[in-house]
Image: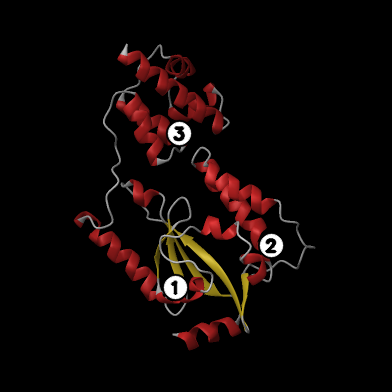
Amino acid sequence: MQYCLHMNAFSDTLKTWRKTRRLSQLDLALEADVSSRHISFLETGRAQPSREMVARLGDALQLPAGTRNQMLSQAGFAPQYTQRDWDDAAMTPVRAALDYTLDRHTPYPGIALDKLWTVERMNAPAKTLFGGLQIAEGDSLLDLMMSDTLPQLIENWAEVAHHAAQRLRTESAAQGGVPALDRAARHLAAIPQTQNQPLGPVAPTIYRMGGTRLSLFATISQFGTPEDLALHDLKIELYFPADDATRQAFEAMG
């Protein structure tokens, strides 16, 4: 009976993710290099997946690490990915790489975010910039985006909200649907858009804080070969000046 319960859970998870990725059973079979009949049997619980098959399905469906662990457990196997504490000795080179990246980005702001947009790390310029927005390490940027703060401080808030909503939807879809991201995306998408402005190479965020005007754009990077759940979802955002006045302002702060 225990086996049936596990298999039903695996079958449901597989079917849900296949539909989330908008694949037919034949599409998934081709991606995973198996027969569509076998996919059908896995989704009805008539066949039991091997550990290798779970891995192949995970690759074909581009599943998040947490979901891969879930499907392995449902199929009766040990999880593949662990989630270490940041203070774990094994994370020492990772912490060093993250600190190096953020510190060397000075005098410009740099932050590290988890999958729910919680700020995990900030360099000194980011603490100055986001401190003015009442954001510190451990706080969520999702809460900030749904507050009344940013519309008063960001000159091009409608444009920024539009791009943020698109990004949130993409990240949520990649993870199979995340309510917190979806809720923030709906909030931002409801903000009325202004008339289209001439397009530049990037869409900056323009802050007006007191008498200071700062125009910034961001690059986003992730760890290339993450084998830990915490690193799978960690994103490093490095902000750069979009105009010379902003560059001079941050260089003066540094």
Question: Tag 3: residue type?
Answer: Ala
* Horizontal side of residue 1 vs 42, given as left or right: left
Above-or-below relation of 47 to 91: above
Above-or-below relation of 190 to 19: below
Tell me, yes or no, if residue 225 can be seen here: no
Distance (Cα) linking label 1 and label 2: 24 Å
Q: Residue at x 53, y 39 (%)?
A: 177
Question: Tag 1: residue type?
Answer: Lys
Residue under numbered circle 2:
159
Distance (Cα) linking label 1 and label 3: 40 Å
The answer to the question of whether label 2 and label 3 lie on touching residues, with beta carbons closer than 8 A, is: no
Mark 1 or mark 3: name the one nearer the start of the chain: 3
Residue under numbered circle 3:
60
Tell me, yes or no, if residue 124 can be seen here: yes
Coordinates of residue 52 in the picture (x, y in percent): 32, 28
Coordinates of residue 120 in the picture (x, y in percent): 39, 60
Label 2 element class: helix
Residue under numbered circle 1:
127
